[in-house]
Image (cartoon, grey):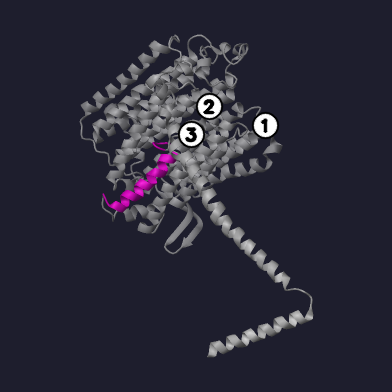
Amino acid sequence: MIENVWLITALPLAGFIIIGLLGNRFGEKLSGIIASLFSSLAFIVTAMIFIEVLTKEESARKIVVKLFDWIVAGKINASVAYQIDPLSLVMTLVVTGVGSLIHFYSIGYMHGDKLSAKYFAYLNLFMFSMLNLVLGSNLLIMFLGWEGVGLCSYLLIGYYYETKEAGDAGKKAFIVNRIGDFGFLIGIFLIIFVFGTLDFSELEHLAKDHHSGELVIFWITLMLFIGATGKSAQIPLYVWLPDAMAGPTPVSALIHAATMVTSGVYMLARLSFLYVKAPETMFIICIIGALTALFAATIGMLQNDIKKVLAYSTVSQLGYMFMGVGAGAFSAGIFHVVTHAFFKALLFLGAGSVIYAMHHEQDIRNMGGLRKKLPITHITFLIGTLAIAGTPLFSGFFSKDEILWKVFNYSPAIWVIGATGALITSYYMFRLYFVTFYGESRSHDHHGLDGHDQGVHESPLIMTLPLIILAVLALAGGFLGIPHILDIFHSGNIIEEFLHHSVSDNAVVSHGKYMEILLMGISVLLAFVGFIFSYKLFFKNKGIPRKDEEYAGLQKTVYNKYYIDEIYNIAFVKSIYHFALVLWRAFDVFVIDGIVNGVARLLKNLGQGMRETETGVVHDYMMYMAGGLVSFFVLLFLFYL
């Protein structure tokens, strides 16, 4: 079955082509069914290959399936080939599994949308691109998928193109990602210059000849990390992700929570053999991840748009993944990628169910009391909240604490930042939960929704069933990575052992088991403190979020996202705009246009002058001929003189 790995990417591509060509004839429902079917078939093929790989010896679990040569130039031989190993299989299972659930959910959510055929075509195209990114056996195929998911992100963020918000958000995402991708490209060019190959297996073999701390390895890994900061929304290139919530909610769940935004973490894990030789870059990654985790969490404390809260939560959780990777715990970072895909997709789809029931209302100040009217959404959203808050036995508890434990061994100071972010995460997520589902309904006080409140009801089965499945995964998924200190059944850390030969973990554990237990207890205590604060303020809706104009001082600054967008707008957008304006007026108009128009005027005047010689009088022409002959002989005489 492994030799048929190409089916995993070909199936979503086939869905994109079929729906793209015939979607208008099929209609919205059939288009959704076809897109979901092809996505599900890709998941089934992945599961079959996964089972086959499990039967092999650990040392034989890496297989490269070459389809054909693509670019052959000098020493470079880039093939269209897919690499099957534990790391790529874990990511592929997440992409196809969670992706298929979101496809089915979209059938219900997008019901009544006249352009939904285009939406489902874009979703399948995204799946094709994302699967190439994680399965590609070389950097060129990875970059093809990398740019493909960027394109699909732009198309799906701007899906509601008739609104200015969606159009601006799509452009912002595309431009910010191009900045990061420029760094990624420089990293690829440096790899070609230094190693002469883009193949992951060859790179890993050649990297053994380089020593840790070499300057060229530092610059290669740093440039690649810049690409990751764009795609995975880290400081300073995180600003596109919150605005990306202008797209349909299932898009936010699939692309901007569960899959695409984790591609930067995956890329670092795939090239872990390079990063372990660049300790300076690893430190930078860990610091950026920690600062992003804390910074985004503080912004999420005061947001009132249900999707914006989850967006900043995603940025923060991505920071934890980078913290783990920077500390050398690549397996822990990928583990959090998996659990985050479960609980964050669940939370976004739960938010979509609330938005669907509330007639597309997204402001939590206009909600309240929904737990009785949306019982399935309420329970599943609670499970997602418990998971992301790090509640014991839920998936987020295992993966987040594994990262914090490895980070503490790397740097206790960075651990303090991560632990503080965990406290704030618990606070703002339970704030979101209580304000949305508890207290009295407030929908009748806003936007003319009086009467609609009585019509609020649970979403259809096509939407609630994916919620239930994801809730089970968010509850049980953490048992894939039980820490050794809690492994009473001696089953081992399954995901760490599975990824052992695929990533170069080099995290050092310098403290004993009692310190690990203490830190785990502190983490749980911090999550509980965050819960208590939220409960006191919002359980009975005593601390309902204020109106925008009521914020002042530090609260106003945090509510306005520290004015980072405004600072970027002044420092970069407007300055570049005015610089371009100067170039246009000073260079384009006077130099470029002056040269082009000047040549045209010169030729026009020459032509006008030559036309005067065309008199039609024979003796004038004879005089021209005589003058020409005289001039010729004079020049000839002067030449030979």
Query: Would you name the residue on which mark 3 appears?
Result: 256
Q: Main secondary structure of the magenta part?
A: helix
Residue 105 occupies which quadrant of the picture?
Answer: top right
Q: Amino acid at mark 3?
A: His
Residue 488 appears at what percent x and percent y?
29, 26
- In this view, 312 is above or below 78: above
Reading the image, the residue beneath label 1 is 114
* Residues at circles 2 and 3 in contact by the CB criterion of under 8 Å: no
Tell me what residue is drawn at x 29 percent, y 47 percent. Answer: 278
Residue 502 picture location, percent across and down: 36, 44
Q: Please report the residue visible at 42 percent of the width from the left and 44 percent of the height from the top.
A: 227
- Left or right: 210 in relation to 2: left
| Earlier sequence position, callout 2 versus callout 3 | 3
SS under mark 2: helix
**Magenta residues, start to end:** 213-236
Identified by mark 1, the residue type is Lys
Secondary structure state at the residue bearing disc 3: helix
> Badge 2 is on which residue?
466
